[in-house]
């Protein structure tokens, strides 16, 4: 049974009953972060990607996996990080080839989480929001890798893919594009020419490579 905890917003003082999300361990048992009833929620003022992860212990098999840190959006507009206990911040030593556990996509944030989880699985570290915001979609950055996530209901445009490549070009870095709705043939052709991996996020949150650069990256990691 997922754990629930009363959470009071420190800004508007409204009280919520927060239920911790359950995530599927590789052994098949659902696990939940242990909420800390003795700590106050933290207002999220600045986005730091590493703060969005906790390591959760599976009581059935003992496995430890990184999952998104519990967060709550108050109707007053305040974003809150719900305190946890018995978990540790995600570490850089996570196995880059651990089994991928998708996050069902119901929102733009879910799409970003799915893309970040996949990049972590491939071995990329220090994943965070990109300093330079793209003209569309959501930008991510890791060591030596700018990435873009398009959570809209339309296919990714040729201009957006080319702009991502231009962002990566000054540092001679690899770049990756994730889209919910796929790519037109001209976009795929251009991405092949520029050696840009293209992934489609299916509704379960599983990234599927749709061109040769993406298949190569999926096979070898960074």
Image (cartoon, grey):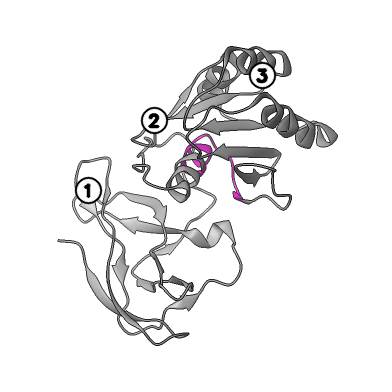
Q: What x and y, as percent, mark residue 14?
A: 36, 84
Q: Which residue is mark 3?
A: 191
Residue 212: say if magenta: no
* Mark number, residue 210: none
Mark 1–mark 2 CB contact (< 8 Å): no
Q: SS at mark 1?
A: loop
Q: SS at mark 2?
A: loop
Q: Is residue 62 left or right of residue 94?
A: left
Disc 3/disc 1 C-alpha distance (Å): 42 Å
Residue at position x 67%, y 24% in the image = 158
Residue at position x 55%, y 15% in the image = 211
Q: Nearer the viewer, residue 66 or 106?
A: 106
Q: Which residue is mark 2?
A: 202
Farthest residue to the front: give it.
154
Q: What x and y, as percent, mark residue 36?
A: 32, 77
Residue at position x 41%, y 81% in the image = 9
Farthest residue to the left: give it.
1
Occupied quadrant, residue 38: bottom left
Disc 2/disc 3 C-alpha distance (Å): 20 Å
| Badge nearest the viewer, 1 or 2 | 2
Q: Which residue is mark 1?
A: 61
Q: Is residue 174 above or below residue 125?
A: above
Q: What x and y, as percent, mark residue 108?
A: 47, 47
In the image, which residues are magenta? 116-128
Mark toward the start of the polypeptide (2 vs 3): 3
């Amino acid at each position: 049974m997922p754990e629930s905890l009363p959470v009071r917003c420190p800004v508007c003082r409204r009280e919520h009953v927060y239920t911790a999300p359950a995530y599927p361990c590789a052994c098949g048992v659902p696990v939940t972060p242990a909420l800390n009833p003795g700590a106050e929620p933290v207002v999220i003022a600045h986005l730091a990607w590493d703060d969005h992860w906790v390591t959760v212990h599976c009581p059935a098999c003992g496995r430890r996996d990184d999952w998104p840190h519990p967060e709550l959006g108050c109707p007053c507009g305040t974003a809150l990080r719900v305190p946890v206990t018995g978990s540790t911040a995600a570490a850089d030593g996570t196995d880059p080839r651990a089994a991928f556990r998708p996050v069902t996509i119901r929102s733009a944030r879910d799409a970003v989480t799915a893309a970040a989880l996949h990049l972590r699985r491939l071995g990329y570290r220090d994943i965070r929001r990109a300093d330079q915001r793209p003209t569309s979609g959501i930008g991510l950055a890791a060591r030596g890798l700018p990435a873009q996530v398009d959570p809209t209901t339309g296919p990714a445009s040729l201009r957006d893919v080319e702009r991502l490549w231009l962002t990566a070009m000054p540092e001679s870095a690899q770049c990756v594009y994730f889209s919910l709705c796929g790519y037109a043939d001209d976009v795929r052709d251009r991405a092949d020419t520029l050696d840009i991996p293209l992934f489609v996020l299916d509704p379960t949150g599983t990234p599927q490579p749709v061109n040769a650069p993406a298949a190569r990256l999926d096979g070898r990691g960074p």
